[in-house]
């Protein structure tokens, strides 16, 4: 367990993080740590690793529901706006066309549905990823700058119900992690 840093007194503990050299190593380590009962894990990799989401136990994405909600809101809003302007605010009877003429309202309704789903996708992604986040405790790991190049990192968060500092260090070291370090908020 090289590179361990002692926790300073009074600092809030974020967790323990270890470095791995390959996608296969981090995938195996994640599965091994999850088998021991740890549940609050997070992995940092330079590229997507197939199967890592399942190994971490992450649920499916909420983004499809966020985008669908934006599309429904935009479409309904566009339809309601067109109906209100043609039937309530400025009603004009033209060639016997009804005030709620759905075929004529389709293009605007569709376009507002697309526009609002795009806004929902952007804002939902930012909110669900808790962005912008200029600082995160994992930045304190001595080798974390390599996470964008060629290294893989696995963190056990202190908010895990089974968290024990020595147990977390040992679990990551037994899983093949190097540079196991304690991270503080």
Image: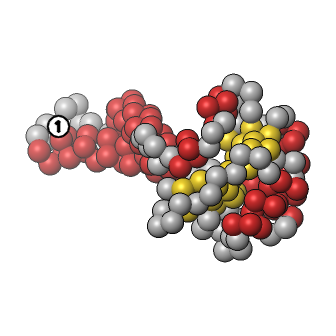
Q: Residue at x 82, y 35 (%)?
A: 21
- Most foreground residue, 142 or 113: 142
Relative placement, left or right, of 77 versus 23 is left
> Where 6 sits versus 22, above or below?
below
Q: Which residue is drawn at 47% across and 67% down?
A: 10
Residue 46 place in picture, x, y as percent: 69, 31
Relative placement, left or right, of 60 versus 103 is right
- Most foreground residue, 85 or 18: 18
- Most foreground residue, 46 or 158: 158
Residue 156 place in picture, x, y as percent: 69, 58
Please give the residue where the numbered disc 1 appears in the rendered image. Answer: 93
SS category of the residue bearing label 1: loop
Q: Hey, which residue is sitting farthest top in the picture? A: 149
Q: Which residue is drawn at 71% across and 46% down?
A: 3
> Where 68 sits versus 107, above or below?
below
Residue 184 place in picture, x, y as percent: 54, 56
Relative placement, left or right, of 84 versus 20 is left
> Where 150 sits versus 58, above or below?
above
* Residue 127 visible (yes or no): yes
Res. 6 image quadrant: bottom right
Residue 176 place in picture, x, y as percent: 87, 48
> Where 8 sits versus 93, above or below?
below
């Amino acid at each position: 367990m090289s590179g361990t840093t002692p926790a300073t007194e009074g600092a809030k503990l974020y967790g323990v993080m270890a470095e791995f050299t390959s996608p296969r190593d981090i995938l195996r380590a994640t599965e091994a740590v999850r088998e021991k009962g740890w549940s609050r894990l997070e992995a940092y990799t330079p590229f997507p690793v197939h199967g890592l989401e399942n190994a971490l136990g992450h649920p499916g994405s909420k983004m499809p529901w966020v985008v669908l909600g934006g599309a429904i809101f935009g479409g309904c809003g566009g339809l309601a706006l067109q109906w209100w302007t043609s039937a309530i605010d400025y009603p004009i009877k033209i060639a016997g066309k009804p005030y709620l003429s759905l075929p004529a309202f389709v293009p605007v309704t569709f376009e507002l549905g697309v526009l609002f789903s795009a806004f929902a996708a952007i804002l939902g992604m930012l909110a669900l990823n808790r962005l912008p986040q200029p600082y995160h405790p994992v930045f304190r790991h001595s080798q974390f700058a390599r996470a964008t190049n060629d290294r893989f990192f696995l963190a056990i968060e202190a908010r895990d119900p089974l968290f024990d500092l020595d147990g977390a260090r040992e679990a990551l070291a037994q899983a093949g992690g190097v540079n196991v370090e304690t991270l503080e908020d």
